[in-house]
Image (cartoon, rainbow, N blue to C red):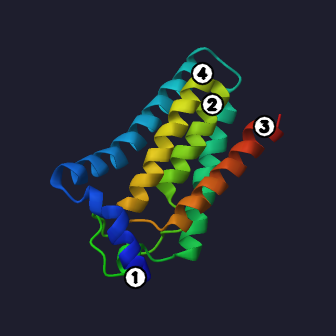
Amino acid sequence: MEYESWYANISAPFRSASATRAINMLDKGLVWAIAAVYLVSLAYLAFTADVRFWKALIVPAATFAIVTVFRAALNKPRPYEEHSIDPIIKKETRGKSLPSRHLASAVIIACALAWINLPLGIAAFAASGVVAFTRIVGGVHYPRDIVASLVISLVCGAIGFILIP
């Protein structure tokens, strides 16, 4: 019952039809926007034969694979499966809540973009913050799922873009 009250409190300001539409649009739209900027950046690196292309491709792909395997292995239930809540973001997915692949992808792409072009990376990190918020307030992820995604992507980003030459 504790989670239900907490979720009711954080989601209450977003229960109007327009706010619910906004949360859903931000959730999907920002992930697509981050991905689009990333793909354009990869295309630019490939077109200019920039040596950073392969690392910018491989580090996010490896992170995506790690997150996908990890969440399938854990197969943690989503908040709407375990609690009597009415999520703002409607999904039928069962399990695979920890970590959030939406957020992990957005954050590792933000890391790649920051490595390629710092202002683009900063914008992508800001957008990722909004995605994190929408996943929790939308009722499709617990805060722990978001924190795990953030940690995994930042660690993979640090290893891939900073520690490995």
Pick whichever, 59 or 102, lies toward us. 102
SS class, disc 2: helix
Q: Which mark sits nearer the N-terminus, 4 or 2? A: 4
Point 57% across, 45% down: residue: 107
**Three-letter code, disc 2:** Ala
Q: Position of residue 137 (x, y in %)?
A: 38, 60
Is residue 134 placed above or below 56 in the rendered structure?
below
Residue annotated with mark 4: 45
Give the camera-side residue of 153 and 53.
Answer: 153
Q: Of helix, strand and loop, which one carries label 1?
A: helix
Residue placed under numbered mark 3 in the picture:
162
Which kind of residue does numbered mark 1 sit on? Glu
- Neighbour tally class for label 3: few under 14, some 14-19, many 20 plus, Cα within 10 Å: few
Relative image position of residue 36 (x, y in whole percent): 43, 32
Q: Earlier in the sequence, mark 2 or mark 1?
A: 1
- Residue pointed to by mark 1: 82
Q: Is residue 152 something one can see in this rendering? A: yes
- Residue sitting nearer the eye, 48 or 6: 6
Residue 58 in the image: state x and y as whole percent: 65, 41
Of badges 4 and 2, nearer the viewer stands 2
Instruction: Give the CA distance from mark 3 to mark 2.
Output: 11 Å
